[in-house]
Image (cartoon, rainbow, N blue to C red):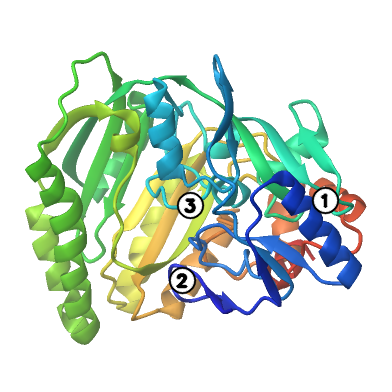
Amino acid sequence: MVFTNWAKNQSGSPAEVRAPASVADVVRAVRDAAAAGRRVRMIGTGHSFTGVALTDGIMLRPHALTGIRSSADDRVTVLAGTPLRVLNELLDERGLALANMGDITEQTVAGAIQTGTHGTGRDSGGLADQVAELELVLADGSVATASPGDDLFDAARVGLGALGVLTAVTFRVEPAFLLHNRRRKLALGEILASLDTLTSANEHLDFFWLPHTDACLVKTNNRHPGPARPPSAVKRWLDNVFLENTVFGAACAVGARFPELIPRINEVSAAALGESESADTSYKIFTARRDVRFLEMEYAVPRERLAQALRETRDLIDRMDWKITFPVEVRVTPPSDAWLSTAYGRDSAYIACHVYRPTPDPAYFEGVEEIMARLDGRPHWGKLHTKDAAYLSKVYPRFGDFVALRDRLDPRRLFTNDYLDLVLG
């Protein structure tokens, strides 16, 4: 079998593939791998752009480890292979919701947590910050429960699969709620001049800057008392399917064939940006559909350096005369206490650069990465970057503690792969 990720830029051939249906099956696979001198990794749905999920040993496919195991009050325990889109529906059936989440929901619970998936939030952090407990199978085949107050909990919430195989996650949840979504067009210069106001005035801020223009699509989400005012089925299809996927995909294809047209394409797109509002169930507002395949690099920088990072990125694109179709996305989160969270210990801003999958542009990513590194940026673990352990140990205060814990729990490197060898050493 050859495993290929969603973006089709990573592939690998494991020696064996298993689909565990229970924790006991995972324990058996880990022990079998150790006895045979093989490595073992559990994949998710392949939404990482890095090789974080690859293995040449035993690959575990978690599609049989799905569903809610238990729920009580403000805690829900879910099996690690459950896709986020399924978790949202299961929670909604119970009148519950996560406080915050990212916009793509195809990932499994385990894959999203282990790579540090985040949304945008003034007060609420990423998925790892909503975890109350973890269950994982360690390299010796034992089953461990990681809870607040112990090092394993703070390390394993964004653990890259390096500490063990995650089998279940307990989330803190809350009663289901509505979000008021507002979409509007603002100039990049106006946003840069009012970043503090925008981030403090909105619970969730997300904006997209169109290169070669000064236009940004700004999305703000704030809790709403009701009643719900969801977009009509036609409006939802028009925005989420036709415009953001069908039309955008066609524009990317034209730009790939005729790069000189990209600035004009972006100008037309900017002119078409309009205002809209709706109030709907939280997960329906948080999430989006992404059909156009792309490659992505994302860095987290200290929040106070966001404006500088954006200005330098804009100036670099202009100076190098690169033709960039995809918008640059910006989000924010509060500090996290998960050791390898990109938001560890600081208010953070995320700058995500994308390129159309059929036309990769390494120079663009390399140039922006140089800017982010000068600003103490931390690369998203599941998105493209070139940084190694030497760099990462300087920007993560608890990096040495994580590596020491990994060395103690997995001295034979049962859970490693080429990507982990690069980023952890």
Residue at image location 76% in from the left, 34% down from the top: 146
Label 2 SS? helix
Tally of numbered discs: 3
Query: How far apart, in angstroms, are the residues tagged by discs 2 and 3?
Result: 24 Å
Callout 2, which amino acid? Phe
Judging depth in this view, the residue of 259 and 280 nearest the camera is 280
Callout in the foreground (1, 3): 3
Relative to residue 376, is residue 230 depicted above or below?
A: above
Q: Which residue is mark 2?
A: 365
Q: Name the foreground residue: 19 vs 96.
A: 19
Q: Nearer the viewer, residue 41 or 421?
A: 41
Residue under pointer 1: 400
Q: In terms of sequence position, does the residue under pointer 2 or pointer 3 come before the other?
A: 3
- Say what secondary structure mark 1 lies in: helix
Mark closer to the chain start, 2 or 1: 2
- Residue ID at (35%, 70%): 355
Q: Quadrant of the N terminus?
A: bottom right
Q: Position of residue 67 (x, y in %)?
A: 53, 38
Amino acid type, callout 1: Gly
- Rendered location of residue 357, percent (x, y): 36, 75
Residue 40 horizontal side relative to residue 269, left or right: right
Tell whether label 3 touches label 1 (CB within 8 Å). Answer: no
Q: Which residue is mark 3?
A: 107
